[in-house]
Amino acid sequence: MGKILFMGAHPDDETFLPGATLAKYADLGHEIYVVSATRGEAGVWADVKPNGKSLGEIRETEHRKAGTILGIKTIEYLDYIDGTLANKHVDDLVTKLKEIAEKINPDVIMTLDLLGISGHIDHIVVSLVTTKMFQEMADIKKLYYFVLPEKVTSEIFNTTGRKVWGRPENEITTTINVERWISNKVEAAKCHQTQMRDVERLIPRWLTYKYDCFVLSGSRVESKFPEEDLFTGI
Ligand SMILES: [Zn+2]
């Protein structure tokens, strides 16, 4: 069985984006690890009462509950503050991420599309950092970007007016059938009580999805496209 390490910027990134894929691979017996650059301190509270706790503390608790539902083995933080990543030096982030990744020794690393998906600059920074780490760690076999197909992002724009960055069909290398694991993603997302406004808006859309899409951004094994499994060639 293999090991997948997902690198995100915020505590809800893996659940809201490749959550169904991670739940599927955990179910298949693979080990899933998550690193989040921040605890989402700059996010919103929705209707959650602070009760003397900081937003970062509450979001970490939500994150760990969601991780249990997705079957994630460990969640670690790089301890940066939400929204500040673009002011840091990329090599410092790579060094911190590498310290964790070297302990885990993953076969596959996954991060968000370099285009940032929602356009959050933190997403673009973690994608860049993960890409640099892949270049420096020769034992990692594959690097994937989780992406949204352009047909999904244009539908989002047409129905909500919200700009989301997607990829044309011909750039997508890997499509994972996640139909059976959408319910795990939905249950995990409901743990993010502070983000409930987004969760309620997103769940009906997720329920229409059958596939998660990825771009294989780096590989040290032979790959034939299109792929239907993250471990093809390993
Ligand atoms: Zn995010």
Image (cartoon, rainbow, N blue to C red):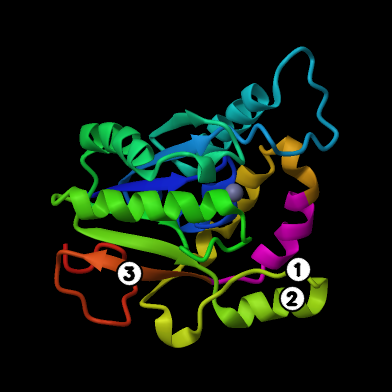
Q: Give the CA distance from mark 3 to mark 1.
A: 26 Å
Residue 216 badge: 3
Q: Is mark 1 within 8 Å of ligand 1?
A: no
Q: Could one spot residue 195 in this view of the protein?
A: yes
* Residue at image location 70% in from the left, 26% down from the top: 55
The answer to whether 63 is drawn above or below residue 211 in the figure is: above
Circle nearer the viewer, 3 or 1: 1
Q: Is residue 130 magenta?
A: no
CA separation in Å, label 1 and label 2: 5 Å
Magenta part of the chain: 198-210
84 lies above or below 201: above
> Which residue occupies the foreground of this view, 212 or 136?
136
Q: Position of residue 133 (x, y in %)?
A: 28, 48
Instruction: First in sequence, mark 3 or 1: give its number.
Output: 1
Q: In the rendered structure, which amino acid carries the disc numbered 3?
A: Leu
- SS at badge 3: strand
Q: Are marks 1 and 2 in contact (CB under 8 Å)?
A: yes
Q: Position of residue 193 (x, y in %)?
A: 74, 36
- What residue is shown with label 1? 162
